Image (cartoon, helix red, strand yellow):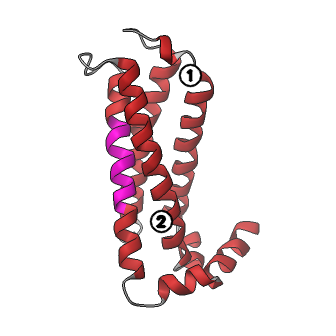
Amino acid sequence: MAIASAAVALESSALGDWMRGGGLSYALVNVLHLLGLALLVGPTLLLDLRLLGAGRAFPLVETVRTLSRIAAAGVAIAVCSGVALFAADAVALWSHPVMRTKLALVLVALTNVALFYAWAGRGRSAWTAEVPMAARVSAAVSLLAWPAIVVAGRMIAYV
C-alpha cells in the first residue's frame, strides 16, 4: 500500500529523526499544533454558528472574511505541525484505527471548506441577512467535523 510506504519513508526521514531526537522538538511542535487547532477550531465554530443564524448582530460578510482568515492560518499551522508529529511514529500511527478516522475526518472537513469556497459560498460578498441553504449545510457539516477531529486526536492516546 502506497500510504504505508509513505509512512515508513516519513518516519525514516530527517523530520522523523528530529521529532524523536529528544530535547524539546516534540513538545514544542505539539504546542504549535495545539495553537493551530485553537486558531482553526475556535473561529471556525463561530463562523459556522454565524452562517447558521446565530450572532446576527455581527455583520455577515465581514465576519466571514475575518474568521476565515484566522482559521486559514490555523489550518496551515495545524497541518504542518501535524505532519511533523505524525513523522515521529508514522508507521504505528497509520495502523491505528482512530488515527485513520481522524485523517478521514480531516479530508471531509477540508473538502467541505473547498466546496464552500468554490460553490456554497459563491457570491458571499453580496450576502446580507440571508445565507444560502448550501452555505448553511456546509456550516453544519463543519460544525460537526472539526470538533470530531479534535476528539479523535485526543482519543488516539486512549484507544
Rounded to the nearest whole Å, what is the CA distance between mark 2 and mark 1? 29 Å
Residue 45 % position (x, y): 34, 37
Residue 5 % position (x, y): 73, 75
Label 1: state its secondary structure.
Answer: helix
Dots 2, 1 in contact, CB < 8 A: no
Tell me the crowding category of disc 1: few under 14, some 14 to 19, or many 20 or more residues within 10 angstroms, Cα based: many
Q: Amino acid at mark 1?
A: Ala
Disc assigned to residue 120: 1
| Rendered residue at 47%/90% (across/down) | 21
Q: Earlier in the sequence, mark 2 or mark 1?
A: 2
Label 2: state its secondary structure.
Answer: helix
Q: Is residue 3 visible?
A: yes
- Judged left or right of residue 77, residue 1 is right
| Rendered residue at 49%/28% (across/down) | 138
The residue beneath circle 2 is: 81
Residue 42 % position (x, y): 31, 43
- Judged left or right of residue 116, residue 67 is left
- Judged left or right of residue 58, residue 61 is right
- Is residue 44 covered in magenta? yes
Q: Is residue 82 above or below residue 62?
A: below
| Rendered residue at 39%/47% (across/down) | 40
Residue furthest right in the image = 2
Front tag of 2 and 1: 2
Residue 59 % position (x, y): 32, 18
Q: Amino acid at mark 2?
A: Ser
Tell me the crowding category of disc 2: few under 14, some 14 to 19, or many 20 or more residues within 10 angstroms, Cα based: many
Quadrant of res 70: top left
Q: Is residue 48 above or below residue 144?
A: above
Instruction: State the quadrant of the C terminus.
Output: bottom left
- Highlighted range, magenta: 34-45
